[in-house]
Every structure is written in structure tokens, then in C-alpha cells.
Amino acid sequence: MAHTAVDATNPAAGDDPSRRDFIHIAAITAAAGGGLAAVWPFVAQMNPAADTLALASVEYDLTKIEPAQQVTINWRGKPLFIRNRTPEQIAAAVKDDGAALRDPQTDAERHKEGKAEWLVLVGSCTHLGCVPTVGGGEYGGWFCPCHGSHYDTSGRIRKGPAPTNLVVPDYAFLSDTKVKIG
Amino acid sequence: MSGQSTYQPSNGFAKWLDARLPVGRLVWDSFVDYPTPRNLNYWYTFGGILSLCLGVQIITGVVLAMHYTPSAAGAFTSVEHIMRDVNYGWLLRYMHSNGASMFFIAVYIHMLRGLYYGSYKAPREVLWLLGCVIYGLMMATAFMGYVLPWGQMSFHGAVVITNLLGAFPIVGDAITTLLWGGFAVDEPTLKRFFSLHYLLPFMIAGVVILHVWALHVVGQNNPTGVEPKSKADTLPFTPYATVKDGFAMSVFLILFAVFIFFMPNALGHPDNYIRADPLVTPAHIVPEWYFLPFYAILRAVPEKLLGVLAMFGSIAVIFALPWLDTSKVKSMRYRPQAKLYFFIFLVVCVILGFCGAKLPDDQVIPGLTTFVLIDSDLNSFVWLSRVATLYYFAYFLVVMPLLGLIEKPLPTPETISSPVLGGEHKD
């Protein structure tokens, strides 16, 4: 390998295309790969930190909520609605299962089986994240004051700019009176 | 910078330095001996005013950062601490918050002046693009700065604006989580906004240097839009432009002082003196006045993603302006029809700003009932915004390209000096 260095006095020696190109491409590729690897931590640090993720679930005692009442609790920095629905509100939601919905879902798909009275929703309007007010709007569910989205008593979008229904988070009943969200 | 430098080092030290770092020569050539068109009017003083604004914002901002706490628990209290306890804290904060508004007043006049006199046309396209980049950085800086006091408007403004990016399909949620550093606007969001709010003004300063460099390569445009042809067309920067700029800055500072001392909260929103509460949204969310036209464009479109695209598009289209205008004549002084469309555009921008401040479903003409068309009542601010948005885009995408081809402009003067000096030509 002693004579592989470019011989400046012999121009033809530096003109070996395949060999020289290979070195260029390999060097540039290594530098680009290294550059990307160096950028990665600087982008990844922006995603939720471990302690933010660790705080991601909450438990709530449902006996504190009267029928027809809603509580708003803080979950992951966002409002979370837990609503104790009356039979009339449930009936109104079930009746509209067949209506023309923007984001079609039946009421049964939006609560746990046998727990129709308990509706657990992320309290952020799916339009731009404002907090809808309970009981408002034309469908008696929620009304978002920012840009006028109307949700029904199942939290489904019925009118206004929001594209989808209020989000049902992952949650589970730990007992008949206790839920764990997240 | 073009031509021979006339710089003469005045003493031994200046001569010694000039041979090693010719910074004195750079200043002399750029701000003393630099030729400016002799017909520049007061609309051309806003470049200087803008550098003054940037200076004021950086100096007051650096000082405010010495007293501010960038945390969700401490931010609101620390701003109140600045207002009540820090010596002259109220003055520094009012200078900074009103300074942002003054900055935008000046930049809008500066941009509209460029639009009117055709300052974006060849050979000044790069100059215009750099200006657009500065404007974009200014908007990002202003938005993040408004979040820092952590009041109700700060917080929910940040929620609404960051949620805009969630409109993009597939990647939307990942982008918002990445921006927030969590599942909602919270502590990590505030901290990164503070860090970037401190960084961006220095990036603006960097682009300003490029902007001035590009300006000094191609030379200033002027109200006639005719390029200087001889020495008779120009005057040295000092004293002519420096004194004129200085006078304009003084007048501008008087207006600035009126806001600071007599109406410091006139351009703000009272809800921002309520501490941020993630569980309660203010009934009526509005951005700062300088974003209202874009907010109106966002709400004019009934579909979320299209609304977001229209809003970003309304800014993007400004970048494309040098290639949309087909006119051979730069200045609208000699384009009677273009002038008409320009003033309509001006009115439309004001209307959009007005619509952005109103509730979308409120009636424009009270009491008049009409019918619903595309999700909204015809007599609503949504429909007024829609019509205005349509003109906004049509101005750039239809009027600009077509008018340049069909309009018959008035005759332009042969040189800048000929109308001033009575047709006398000295070369």
C-alpha cells in the first residue's frame, strides 16, 4: 500500500475515478451520519421528560360526584372531565347514535360497559384546545366558547369547527367507585 | 460599498488600525460617505427606526431577564414583582411590552412602503427575502414573549397556536408533543419559550446585518423607482440621511413615550393580568393586535387544516412577491391602477384585523337576519373575513401578475434629479 498516495507529479494517478469517488462518498456519508447522530439528542430532549411521563396517570374517587354533576381535574396538564350522566342525558345520547355525525361513534363506544352514567373525557376542544363549558350548546353536552363548537351529551361533535369528538382517554375502573386514568 | 473608498484615517492610530482591521473604513463607507437617492421621503426612515426598536427590545429584555423567573409557578409572580418592587421595573416592562407593538407598527409601515414603491423588484429580491425572514423571526419572538408572563391570555394563546400545528395529518400530534415537552402547554413549554425568546432577537440582529449588506450592494430604492444614474441623483448618507432618520426617530419616540406613560395597557388584554389556569379558558381568546389579520384568515376557513394552511400561506405569499409582480415600473407613483388596488389592500388588512378581534359569529350589521351559507350566517364576521381573505390572496396572486401586463403606466422621469433640479443633467 506504500504507493497508494496521490502522486502530485503524476496527474494520472489522481484521476482514478472509482477509488477517489469512493473515498469522497464514504467521508461525506460518515460526516453526514455523524452530524445527524449529534443532532438527535438536541431534538429528542424536547419530547416529554421521564418525570413528566411518570406523572401521567391519576386516580379519582367517583363517590364525590353527584348525578348530573361534572368534575374537572388536571390530568397531564390538561383538564379532564368526569361527568355523572342522568338517565335522560344517556337516552338523548343513545337516541342520536343514528344521526348524521361528523365523527361517527355510538354512545356505547364512549363509556365502559355497564357504566353508562360515567363519561370520562379529555376536556380539550379538538379544534384548538380551549376548554368547553359543560351543559352549554344546542345539544346540552358541551360548548366551546373560543370558536363555537357544540358537543352532545356523549361528547360527540355536532356543530362548529372541531373535527372530532372529545377524546376518551385510556382509563379503567379499579373498583365500582374508583377510576384510574392514563 | 461600490466604487472607491474615500476614507482617510485621521490620526496615527486610525491608520495603524485601518491596515489591520478596517472597521473605521467600513463605517465610513456604509454610514457616512454612502450615496443615498436625494429624493428619499419620510417613509424611508423606518429602517433606522426598526434598528432602534430592536436595540430597545434587546436592552430592556436583557434587564428584565435579570428579574424574571421562567417557571410555571414563578413566572406570573415575578412579572408582578418587576411591576411593583423592582426599581423602575414598571418602566422597563412597559417599554418592552409596548416596544413590541411599536416594533410591529414600524415593520408594517416599512413593508407597505416597500410594497408601494416596488422595493422588492430586481435587483432587490434577496433584500426583500431577508426582510421577510426578519419579519418571520419577529413574529416567533413576539409570540413566545407574550407567553412568558403566564397570564390567562399567554397560556391559552399558546394552547391555541401550538394546537394549530396539530392540524397536520399523521405528524400533527408528534409535533405538538415535541413542542410542548409534555401532553399540554406546561412548565417545559414555558422554559423553552423563554430560552428561544432570548435567542431569537440576536438571530434577528444577524439577519439585519445581512439585510443592510444586501441593501448596500444594490443601493436604496426611492419614490420614483428610477435607479440613480449620476452623482446629481444622490447625496451622502451623513449628514442627509442620518439627520432625517434622527428626526424621524425622535418623533417616533414621542409616540412610544405616549404609550408607555399614558396608556401602557391600551394594546394589551386585561385577562393577561389573571394567572394562567389550564382548566378555564377565557371566554374570548384574541392574539395581540399585530396578529389579528392572520387570526381572521385562520377563522375564515371552515376546515381546520385548510385554515392553518391559509394562515401560513398568507405569510408565505409575501416571500413570493418579487416573482408575482410582472410590472416593468417599480413605483406605484406611476401606476394609477396599482395604486388603487394597493389602497384597497390596505383597507382589507385593517378589516381583517378588525374581524380578528371580533367573535366570529357576531353580526356585522346588528339586527339584520340573513341566511346561512357554508356553515356561517352571511351577516357575520366570518363572512366579512372570508371576503377580505379572498381579496388578500387575490391581490398577490391575481392582481399583481395580471396588472403588470395590462396596465399602462404613466411616464417615469429619466433620472431622479431631473424633476427636482429642473431637467438639469450633470454627469
Image (spheres, coloured by chain):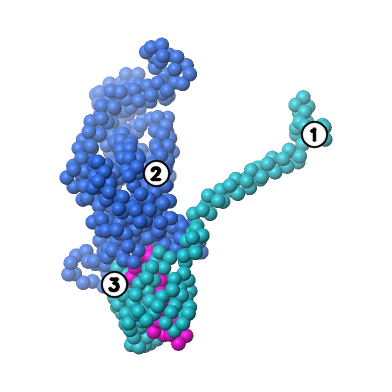
Chain colours: A cyan, B blue
Label 3, label 1: how far apart the Cα atoms are: 80 Å
Label 3, label 2: how far apart the Cα atoms are: 47 Å
Tell me the amino acid under the disc marked 1: Thr
Residue B99 falls left or right of residue B1: left
Q: Nearer the viewer, residue B60 or B168?
A: B60
Q: What range of the chain is rendered magenta?
A: A107-133
Query: Residue B193 at what x, y percent from top left?
Result: 40, 51
Which chain does the residue under circle 2 lie in?
Answer: B
Tag 3 residue: B372
Q: Indicate whether A87 appears above or below B211.
A: below
Q: Indicate whether A93 appears above or below B342.
A: below
Labels in figure, total:
3
Tag 2 residue: B198
What's the magenta bit mostly, secondary-structure-wise? loop
Element type at mark 3: strand
Which of label 3 and label 1 is nearer to you? 1
Tell me the amino acid under the disc marked 2: Tyr
| Residue under the point 33% across and 70% down | A132
